[in-house]
Amino acid sequence: MEYREIRPEDDAALAALIRKSLEANRLDIPGTAYFDETLDHLSDHYLGDPAKRFYYIAEDDGEVAGGIGLDKADLFDECAELQKLYLADRVKGCGYGYRLIELIEDKARELGYRRMYLETHTNLEAAIRLYEKCGYYLIEKPEAIVHSSMNRFFLKEL
């Protein structure tokens, strides 16, 4: 597996991967990434302000096999939000999720963040186990979150 920064030519494959994963977990509903206006052009978003956001692509044999991003989160001081961690079914269970989290946490530190926040859903049991094994702890839903279908919220000090 190779890891690199997102490029515009990744947009279609990444959007398809994310939608397929959300459909498989019955999360193709409003309030999830499925309906994000930026989903079909994630490179525009993540390349638009490199001082506060970033997205890694996991590439396997020249194909997009997953990815993970971060963006500034105004919910907590010096906090980034871990965003859009997805892997293709063919590479799940091989430890790539751990590697992607390690990479994005290192990038967050490089950008000056001191903590990471994330939102997920109880339907994503494997993801929740991954986050917990990586040191994320469950917190109450932040008051600033008003229109989200996510129902589990985590934080980690970097």
Image (cartoon, rainbow, N blue to C red):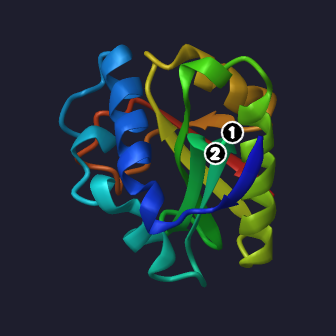
Task: Tell me what residue is drawn at x 60 percent, y 64 percent.
Answer: 80
- Location of residue 16 in the rendering, given as x and y in whole percent from the top left corner: 35, 37
Label 1: few (<14), some (14–19) or many (≥20) C-alpha neighbours in 10 Å: few
Tell me whether circle 2 and circle 1 mark residues in contact (CB < 8 Å). yes
Task: Tell me what residue is drawn at x 69 percent, y 35 percent.
Answer: 137
| Residue 61: image tag | 1
- Location of residue 70 in the rendering, given as x and y in whole percent from the top left corner: 57, 60
Instruction: Label 1: state its secondary structure.
Output: loop
- Location of residue 72 in the rendering, given as x and y in whole percent from the top left corner: 53, 70
Query: In the image as oriented, which residue stretches furthest toward the front?
Result: 61
Task: Tell me what residue is drawn at x 40 percent, y 29 percent.
Answer: 151
Query: In the image as oriented, which residue stretches furthest toward the left?
Result: 30
Residue that carries the numbered disc 2 in the rendered image: 62
Image quarter where the C terminus lies is bottom right
Inter-mark Cα distance, 2 to 1? 4 Å
How many marks are shown on the rendered structure? Answer: 2
Residue nearer the viewer, 79 or 16: 16
- Location of residue 90 in the rendering, given as x and y in whole percent from the top left corner: 61, 19
24 over 1 or under it: above or below: above
Q: Quadrant of residue 97?
A: top right
137 over 8 or under it: above or below: above
Residue nearer the viewer, 145 or 134: 134
Q: Quadrant of residue 51?
A: bottom right
| Res. 109 visible in picture | yes
- Drawn side of residue 63 relative to residue 109, left or right: left
Instruction: Label 2: state its secondary structure.
Output: loop
